[in-house]
Image (tube, grey):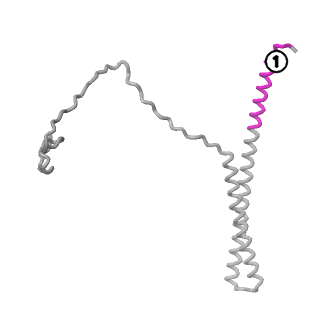
Amino acid sequence: MVPGDAPDELLQLRAELALAREQAEQARDKALVAEAEVAKVWAINADLLARNAHLELMNEQMRRDKYGARSERSRRLLDQLELTFEELEANASEAELLGQIAAAKTTTVQAFTRKRSTRRDFPADLPREQVTIRERTWRATPGFSRSTGMPASMPCSRTAART
């Protein structure tokens, strides 16, 4: 082995490792998508089974209402159909929840970052003029308002409007 070949071989092995990791990540993503699809199909199937059980229960109840109670056995069958429907309904909701969890694993949501605008500098080519505003000086005269210059005892409604 030539001593100069070791760095090239190391770079090649690192590239192959990166490629293998990328392929493994893609395979994992495909497996998660397939798992989510299977969970969705199971949820749909469980929902359809629950709906069928509900329709059978409604048929039996309507038949019982229309023709009357035939025997004690039919009442027990009706109770059994109700229990089956409740069980299938619980299975459907559980399968739907599992489907949502599996779908959440495959969905990637990027974080929202707000772009804050920075305050732009004043263009250098524009002329600048520095203006100083002097502060007003007021004499502290007892009984006069600072803002209007009117006596403080005079009501506001009687003060003249400024224009």
Residue at position x 13%, y 51% from top?
155
Front residue of 76/53: it is 76
Q: Amino acid at mark 1?
A: Ala
Q: Which residue is mark 1?
A: 6
Residue 58 picture location, percent across and down? 68, 74
Task: Reply above or below: 140 against 57.
Answer: above
Q: Which corner quadrant of the image does residue 26 belong to?
A: top right
Residue at position x 15%, y 42% from top?
148
Q: Which corner quadrant of the image does residue 89 belong to?
A: bottom right
Residue at position x 19%, y 33% from top?
136
Front residue of 107/129: it is 129
Q: Is residue 112 left or right of residue 77?
A: left
Residue 21 part of the magenta segment: yes
**Other-residue count near label 1 (Cα within 10 Å), few / some / many at <14 / 14–19 / ≥20:** few
The quarter of the rendered structure image containing the C terminus is top left
Task: Reply above or below: 88 against 11.
Answer: below
Front residue of 49/110: it is 110
The quarter of the rendered structure image containing the N terminus is top right
Residue 15 part of the magenta segment: yes
**Number of callouts:** 1
Front residue of 141/1: it is 141
Judging from the image, what secondary structure is the residue with disc 1 in?
helix
Query: In terms of secondary structure, what is the magenta stretch mainly?
Result: helix
Residue 115 picture location, percent across and down? 50, 35
Residue numbers of the magenta segment: 2-25
